[in-house]
Image (cartoon, rainbow, N blue to C red):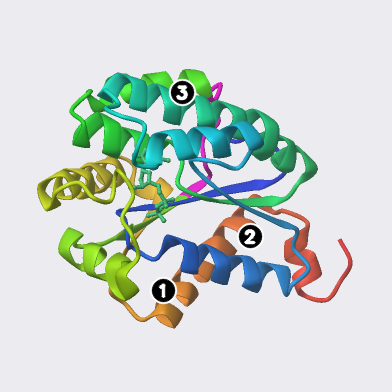
Amino acid sequence: MTNQNPGLFIAFEGGDGAGKSTQAAALAGALESRGVKVLRTREPGGTPIGEKLRSLVLDHGHGHIDARTEALIFAASRAAHADQVILPALERGDVVLTDRYIDSSVAYQGAGRELGTGAVHDLNEWATSGLQPDLTVLLDVDPAVGRLRRTAGDAAEDRMESEADEFHAKIRSAFLDLAAGRPDHYLVLPAHLPVDELASLILARVDELLLSRQIPWQVSRNGVAP
Ligand code: TYD
């Protein structure tokens, strides 16, 4: 089910170290400077229970977590996030920017952990009552480059990040397959482009979407109150 609410729902996806958070922050800033109400959020997390689930599934030290348990924890965090945070904001008419959504589970658990992309997709459709983004921005990053970027300054790697490059290569191709299956829904960009160039390409695409949806803030952009 596509988003039928007045707000606009945009997901940022990509491998670890792709620069999603930087781009989500840049887009939020550009939209807010025009008076658009933006909600920035992330997965796993975004709610009190989601943040607890995040530390359960990402922190080292909880012992072995089998792939199905892992997929269910991400889906549980997402269910709370969709119901308590994303949907209410879309109903209010906000632009919601999430750092990761269903595609991350399809890529990491479906492809990376080999649970099957279809099964993981279906689980998450159920968890979110089918709430889908209007646009998914996929920042495509080479796994080796992503690892270098995220360990710059010796940042410690979490459970997923510390997986081998082959695991991250499977994830990268799963993301690209998802985008190839629905080209209208995705904006795929090479993560190595300069930050400012990426930001303007993303903003241009979001502007098209705002115009095509004839959402009131396109009027306020021209200085006229919606
Ligand atoms: P995070 O610190 O948010 O990484 P990033 O900044 O790269 O997004 O950690 C999220 C990690 O959890 C990341 O390695 C991807 C993984 N993940 C899944 O495996 N499945 C999921 O459904 C989600 C949302 C994240």
Q: Residue 68: percent from the left, percent from the top?
A: 30, 20
Q: Viewed as shown, does residue 173 lie left or right of 195?
A: left
Is the Cβ of the residue at disc 3 closer than 8 Å to that at disc 1? no
Kind of residue at disc 3 = Glu
Establish if 207 lies above or below 159. below
Task: Please report the residue visible at 74 percent of the width from the left and 36 percent of the height from the top.
Answer: 88
Residue 125 tag number: 3
Residue 130 drawn in magenta:
yes
Q: Residue 111: percent from the left, percent from the top?
A: 21, 34
Q: Viewed as shown, does residue 178 lie left or right of 94?
A: left
- Most prominent secondary structure in the magenta stretch? loop
Residue, disc 1: 198
Is the Cβ of the residue at disc 1 closer than 8 Å to that at disc 2? no
Q: Residue 10: percent from the left, percent from the top?
A: 54, 50
Q: Which residues are magenta?
A: 128-135
Establish if 158 lies above or below 27. above
Q: Secondary structure at mark 1?
A: helix
Q: 88 or 204, which is in the foreground?
A: 88
Is the Cβ of the residue at disc 2 closer than 8 Å to that at disc 3? no
For the residues labelled 1 and 2, the Cα–Cα distance comes to 20 Å
Establish if 181 lies above or below 138. above
Kind of residue at disc 1 = Leu
Residue, disc 2: 211
Quadrant for the C terminus, please: bottom right
Kind of residue at disc 2 = Leu
Q: Residue 101: percent from the left, percent from the top?
A: 46, 41
Q: Residues within 10 Å of mark 3 (few under 14, many from 20)?
A: some
For the residues labelled 3 and 1, the Cα–Cα distance comes to 29 Å
